[in-house]
Image (spheres, rainbow, N blue to C red):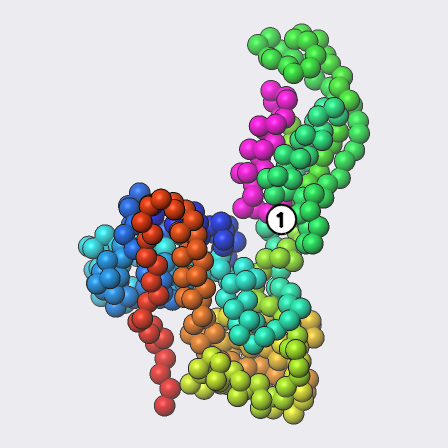
Amino acid sequence: MQVADVLNLLDQWAPLAYSEEFDNTGLLVGSPNAEVTGIMVCLDALESVVQEAIDKDCNLIVSFHPIIFSGLKSLSPNDHVTRSVTKAVIHDIAIIAVHTALDNLPTGVSGTMAKVLGLQNTQVLLPKTGVMHKLVTYAPSKVADQVREALFSAGAGALGLYEQCSFNTEGLGTFFPKDGAKPAVGETGQRHTEPETQIQVSFLSHQKSAVLKALKTVHPYQEVAFDLIELSQGCPEIGMGLIGDLPKSISVDGLLAQLKKDFNCGSIKHSANNGQQISKIAVLGGSGSFAIDRAKQLGAQAYITADLKYHDFFKASEDFILMDIGHYESEQFTKDLIVEYLSKKITNFAPALPTIKVLKSNVKTNPISYY
């Protein structure tokens, strides 16, 4: 198994296409063609984690946060970023980062928080825009069913709890095959009119290659006409954060105590205790101040996230409480999530070959201490 294979497995789970524009995900250090000896999973690929990977014969690090976030002007080991990258390069250690690709997965970072809290009936807090596309194509009516089935098999036409969704319009298509053309219907040098079906299906951005390949493979025409349209609506299945219901309401003090225990928090910053019973909670792992208004809009009584600033807490109200449990604390279970996924996928990747070890880093990379 090569580094590229691991990257592909991760992309099948948390497509890099869903990463935020500001982010830096994917293969950051190393060759995609390197044979993998072992995988070390961490939150931050610090120098100490690279050393841990070396000690345990792992030449690939899968990190949640990207160690290279902005451009590097030098690899002189003067700070925590360049020291880590330099050490990885010297010892042929590859580094992959998944970050917001996993943040935008409902079963990812926020999904793990929701699971720890026992939230039910969850939905995405901030559906991601720009990831849904519409394909409009035209096929001879006599083969329209085959074209639709191929598109469905490639993943197109899925909308929430529904699959095989399409819109179809009957009409007439015309074309004039020039010399050298090989028309599936009609004759070279003569304009042809063919009963055609316009087929419209939606798909997600990471499915684009598969959908177009399916279309061109099954379509009988030498030149396939189609349009791709980016949809402005957010995708309800992809995005940041989750909101859901507790199976049983709990007091603010009870929720704070549960958070401190279950997330091993050194401290919790929160807005004024309004004394109400909490039953609807929004969560977003990592820095989540940008989703405060959305959490309020959807009726959350408590919003659990991290990195809230002084003025953010003024957005609390009598029926809405803000809780900052810490950046590291909100994302700490992500390592287990990645290890579990890769362990299963790698075992099934090549059952005849020795299983590549997937280890969880024991290095605590939280830079914050509590007194």
Q: Residue 15 location in percent, x, y?
A: 50, 51
**Highlighted magenta segment, given as a residue range:** 203-224
Of helix, strand and loop, which one carries label 1?
strand
Q: Which residue is mark 1?
A: 132
Residue 5 appears anywhere in the view: no
Name the image quarter holding residue 46.
bottom left
Residue 8 appears anywhere in the view: yes
Q: Residue 143 location in percent, x, y?
A: 71, 25
- Disc 1: CA contacts within 10 A as few (<14), some (14-19) or many (>=20): many
Identify the residue at image location x=44%, y=76%: 329
Identify the residue at image location x=45%, y=70%: 333
The question of residue 299 being in magenta is answered with no
Q: Is residue 145 above or below residue 288?
A: above
Identify the residue at image location x=63%, y=26%: 219
Q: Residue 221 location in percent, x, y?
A: 63, 21
> Which residue is most to the front?
352
Predominant SS along the magenta part: helix
Identify the residue at image location x=63%, y=89%: 251
Q: Is residue 263 above or below residue 211?
A: below
Amino acid type at circle 1 is Met
Of 231 and 222, nearer the camera is 222
Q: Is residue 228 above or below residue 326?
A: above
Of 325 and 37, nearer the camera is 37
Quadrant for the C terminus in the image: bottom left
Q: Is residue 293 above or below residue 131?
A: below
Name the image quarter holding residue 280.
bottom right
The question of residue 207 being in magenta is answered with yes
